[in-house]
Amino acid sequence: MPGKYSVLSVTTLGSLMAAIDSTVVFLAIPAMGRFFGAGVSFLSLVVVAYLVTSTSTMIPGGNLATKYGKKSFYMLGFALFTLSSALIAASPDILFVIAFRALEGVGAGLLSTSTIPILLDVFPPGERGRAVGINSVSWAVGALAGPVLGGLLVSFDWRYIFLINVPIGLFALAAGYSRIPRDEGKPGVDVDLYSMAGLLIFLVPLIMGISFLYLPWLFFALAALPVFLVVEHRRPLIPRALIRNARYDYIMCASTLQAMAFFGTTYSLSVYLQDDLGVKPLLAGLLLASYPVASLLANPLGGYLLDRTRRGAAIMAGGLLLQGGSLAALAFQLTRFDYMSALLFLAGFGGSLYWASSSTLAIDASGGEHRSLASGALFTVRNIALIISISAFPVFMAATSPGVLLLHANIHIQDAVMYYLLTAGTLSCLSAAFMLPYRMAP
């Protein structure tokens, strides 16, 4: 049987690839727009397609992996991720890029949902926390490396950010085949695809309608809403026991607002820096890297403060106020790169301080019986907020830049666009922060 740390090396490599790929594409968006002659609506879908499929794959993917074998689905995820990366780099049109990014997201979702169960199978109980912790570090490292690596590779050619996945993926496939032990699966496991199908029927047309400012898609999403609600009533993504938990409900709502501000900022700034201010991709990546650097510091600090003080509401409110205040200050210092890097650091620090404590409190509030489901639901809702915030980027452009072409290459983001985006992020953070002390005990 392969050694447990040999297995950990493979899963850590997979997590690192998925983490890098979720952010590395931000720096390539302007170059891809110029190459394909594509507008901001199509380019936003390059990011959103990956997030939609990776998010929607996780819950049913976990059930399928349990039923048919975790190794099989982990290897399938790596194969899809590697193949789609090569196809994106060879795409002749932006529509092919969007389609293959969706396929890449499926691969990332299968990788992510199978990783921890594989580790729990090969590590004994006393070592599982350490193994998962080591694997989790790769997500933080990937989030930090993504902007810098993306800026460096895009300086040569945007295709390199996808081509680099191919040799790494082939190596990981060979290593995974030999190192990860095969499991037989559990044929009796029930696989529920209805809840995620109901979500996609509503979410996809909503995203398309927002991204392209196209009313028929929005009307279709409105018409699909009753279907989604019926499916959720019969097969809820979030167990009813959690829905009746006031603390969990509030944190879910607050996390939705916070995630919209947190991630929409990074995406919009990556485009603004390059296309409006003329910053080189590598410098833009270095400026944006202060955001994940802050997360590396604030995540463990947030958990430590929660353990020592047990004042979760105060820690979360403080994090939200710091994030919101930093975004507000950034709105007035957009062209000052020294201030931008420092303010992004503070925004990332506050957001991560909030996320570490809120995740712990939400999952603890669910009780032992629902902890896995509570964690999965919190992650899913957070990703949906991220998807909607990026999809709304063209809305701000159209509202503040009359005559902007959303379907063709014309990505010149005026200062007003970023001002209103950052103001919206500030209001999202402050809305959650000022409600928190009155809705939840410390």
Image (tube, helix red, strand yellow):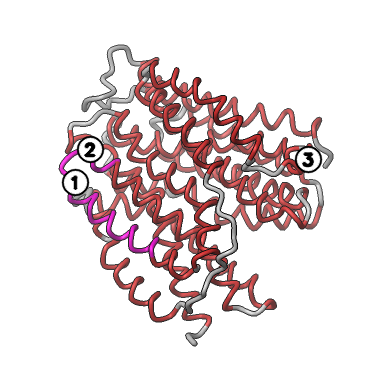
Quadrant position of the C terminus in the picture = top right
Question: Are there few (<14), some (14-19), or many (20+) residues within 10 Å of tag 3?
Answer: few
Question: Are there few (<14), some (14-19), or many (20+) residues within 10 Å of tag 1?
Answer: some
In this view, the residue farthest toward the bottom is 1
Question: Mark 3: which amino acid?
Answer: Asn
Q: CA distance from mark 3 to mark 1?
A: 47 Å
Residue drawn at point x = 17 percent, y = 38 percent: 35
Residue drawn at point x = 47 percent, y = 24 percent: 221
Q: Secondary structure at mark 1?
A: loop
- Identify residue for label 1: 91
Q: Position of residue 69 (x, y in %)?
A: 50, 68
Q: Secondary structure at mark 2?
A: helix
Question: Are there few (<14), some (14-19), or many (20+) residues within 10 Å of tag 2?
Answer: many
Disc 1 + disc 2, Cβ < 8 Å:
yes
308 relative position to 120: left or right: right
Question: Mark 1: which amino acid?
Answer: Ser
Instruction: Please provide the residue range marked out in magenta.
Output: 76-98
Give the numbered dot on residue 94: 2
- Identify residue for label 3: 245
Q: Is residue 299 magenta?
A: no
Dividing the picture into quadrants, the one containing residue 439 is top right
Q: Is residue 94 magenta?
A: yes
214 relative position to 183: left or right: left
Question: Mark 2: which amino acid?
Answer: Ile
Residue drawn at point x = 45 percent, y = 61 percent: 111
Q: Position of residue 360 (x, y in %)?
A: 71, 52
Disc 3 + disc 2, Cβ < 8 Å:
no
Viewer-proximal residue among 253 and 33: 253
